């Protein structure tokens, strides 16, 4: 159970929470709380004081009201697969876990929408509607385990974000619980509604503005034809030229992914697809979808562009089984790194497509400088990099050095005109670098917005914005005392 020194403080809170959720809805044993001390970024850990497991919007609202009454910080958590520490607990906090909120509330095929609770797993949405010829487009690599609520919080992307956009492009409306426990409906059942775009503001806010408890998603008709083209290159520069050439030709693939030689061999060692040439310096996976005649035409054009850019061999697949096999290695890239290294640290920067060769060359230089291997897998179509830095966490000081290396990669992305995050969010991991990308005025304005929804700063505190305690020199560039705003 809890340490006796804090029993008196927490007993009345536990009693109130159990009156709402029942005894099985509140996790309080010290050993059971270990499960929730981190998300998909395990290098940062903090055990929560309590974990709550609501099933309805009303229960979430009551939990938040209790936290608000006692001024206890609270943090929403979905499946715990986030990679930026967005669901990392803070000291003496209550974790609101949506794992039991897994109902599909409504499916409207005529209007191409589905309403779900936040604990629904991403891939379950497509499974629920595929029999009627529909699917849900956003597909993070973790789609078989990540939840829709987490996708909404982080504005997750995936392979198909090039053509179809990220989560924000597929959320029509939300039922949310604010940081004061008020239940609000924002957005609606159509893509555009009058007034402020509060749905767009909420998606990607990383739990700092409240918690989504019902989510209305757009579903799409399954394309008539789908084809995957795989091309291998003897240089990353040539693969980058092919990416640019495809876009310049007016072709917008459903997805376009690149992997470097290191990641190719790591994947083949573990997954053994026998699809990726081990001697290639880079491979390009291009998925095309649409009408059959359109896909056939684009496949020929993509193959020709790749050949002009120096592709060695080009293969393509239209049948589902072979397509899935071609994608299997890319989808398993993160898991493959876990097999060949005791630990890895993944970053999530964005650069202009034209800067891909330059940035990858500089990442290789940073790898040599710091002495850590880096595998590069990324959404080539929109320049979203996922460098995976391999290291041994048992070596003293290794993670601190790797963290510094990851920061240098993010600064490089900003320097060439990119961003410090494409889909993983800022969370705890990247907040130190917000002042590299945004001015003091920018960050102050963001804080005004945050404080209007979250006046006491109880909803996911310490996330997104730099603070002196955690960010050293980066935080010094960002003052934390704003006129009329809350500093976290």
Image (cartoon, helix red, strand yellow):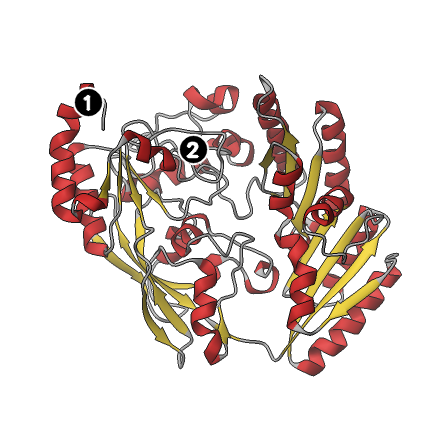
Q: Residue at x 53, y 59 (%)?
A: 139
Q: 4 above or below 220?
A: above
**Label 2 packing within 10 angstroms: few (<14), some (14-19), many (20+):** many
Q: Position of residue 170 (x, y in %)?
A: 45, 64
The image quarter in which residue 347 lies = top right
Q: Residue at x 55, y 43 (%)?
A: 421
Task: Say which residue appears at 47% left-offset and 68% top-offset.
Answer: 126
Q: Quadrant of residue 117?
A: bottom left
What's the mark number on residue 465?
2
Q: Is residue 259 left or right of residue 437?
A: right
**Label 2 to label 1, Cα distance in Å?**
30 Å
Decide if residue 456 is on the left or right side of residue 278.
left
Residue under numbered circle 1: 6
| Residue toward you, 185 or 281 | 281
In the rendered structure, which disc, 2 or 1, sits on the residue that comes first in sequence? 1
Q: Nearer the viewer, residue 400 or 189?
A: 400
Residue 321, x across and y down, in percent: 65, 69
Q: In this orientation, which residue lies closer to the viewer: 394 or 365?
A: 394
């Amino acid at each position: 159970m809890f340490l006796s020194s804090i029993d008196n403080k927490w007993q009345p809170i536990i009693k109130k929470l159990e009156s709402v959720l029942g005894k099985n809805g509140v996790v309080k044993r010290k050993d059971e709380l270990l499960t929730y001390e981190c998300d998909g970024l395990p290098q940062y850990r903090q055990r929560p004081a309590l974990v709550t497991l609501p099933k309805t919007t009303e229960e979430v609202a009551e939990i938040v009201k209790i936290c608000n009454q006692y001024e206890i910080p609270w943090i929403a958590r979905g499946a715990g697969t986030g990679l930026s520490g967005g669901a990392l607990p803070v000291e003496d906090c209550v974790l609101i876990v949506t794992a039991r909120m897994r109902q599909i509330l409504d499916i409207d095929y005529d209007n191409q929408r589905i309403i779900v609770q936040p604990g629904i797993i991403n891939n379950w949405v497509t499974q629920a509607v595929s029999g009627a010829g529909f699917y849900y487009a956003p597909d993070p690599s973790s789609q078989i385990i990540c939840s829709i609520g987490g996708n909404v919080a982080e504005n997750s992307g995936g392979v198909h974000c090039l053509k179809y956009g990220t989560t924000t492009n597929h959320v029509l409306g939300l039922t949310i619980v604010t940081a004061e426990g008020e239940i609000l409906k924002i957005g609606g059942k159509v893509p555009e509604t009058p007034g402020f775009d509060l749905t767009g503001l909420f998606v990607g806010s990383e739990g700092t503005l409240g918690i989504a408890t019902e989510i209305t998603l757009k579903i799409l008709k399954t394309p008539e034809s789908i084809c995957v083209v795989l091309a291998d290159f003897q240089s990353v520069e040539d693969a980058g030229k092919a990416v640019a050439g495809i876009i310049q030709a007016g072709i917008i693939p459903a997805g376009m992914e690149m992997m470097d030689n290191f990641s190719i061999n790591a994947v083949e060692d573990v997954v053994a697809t026998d699809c990726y040439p081990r001697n290639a310096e880079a491979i390009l996976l291009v998925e095309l979808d649409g009408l059959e005649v359109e896909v056939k035409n684009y496949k020929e054009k993509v193959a020709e562009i790749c050949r002009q850019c120096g592709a060695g061999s080009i293969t393509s697949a239209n049948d589902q089984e072979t397509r899935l096999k071609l994608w299997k290695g890319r989808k398993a890239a993160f898991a493959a790194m876990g097999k060949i290294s005791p630990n890895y640290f993944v970053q999530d920067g964005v650069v202009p497509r034209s800067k891909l060769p330059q940035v990858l060359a500089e990442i290789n230089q940073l790898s040599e400088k710091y002495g850590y291997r880096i595998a590069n897998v990324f959404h080539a179509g929109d320049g979203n990099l996922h460098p995976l830095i391999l290291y041994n966490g048992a070596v003293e000081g290794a993670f601190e050095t790797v963290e510094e290396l990851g920061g240098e990669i993010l600064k490089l992305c900003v320097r060439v005109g990119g961003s410090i995050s494409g889909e993983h969010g800022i969370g705890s991991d990247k907040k130190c670098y917000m002042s590299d990308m945004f001015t003091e005025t920018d960050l102050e304005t963001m804080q005004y917005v945050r404080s209007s929804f979250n006046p006491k700063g109880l909803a996911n505190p310490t996330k997104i914005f730099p603070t002196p305690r955690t960010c050293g020199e980066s935080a010094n560039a960002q003052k934390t005392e704003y006129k009329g705003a809350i500093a976290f």
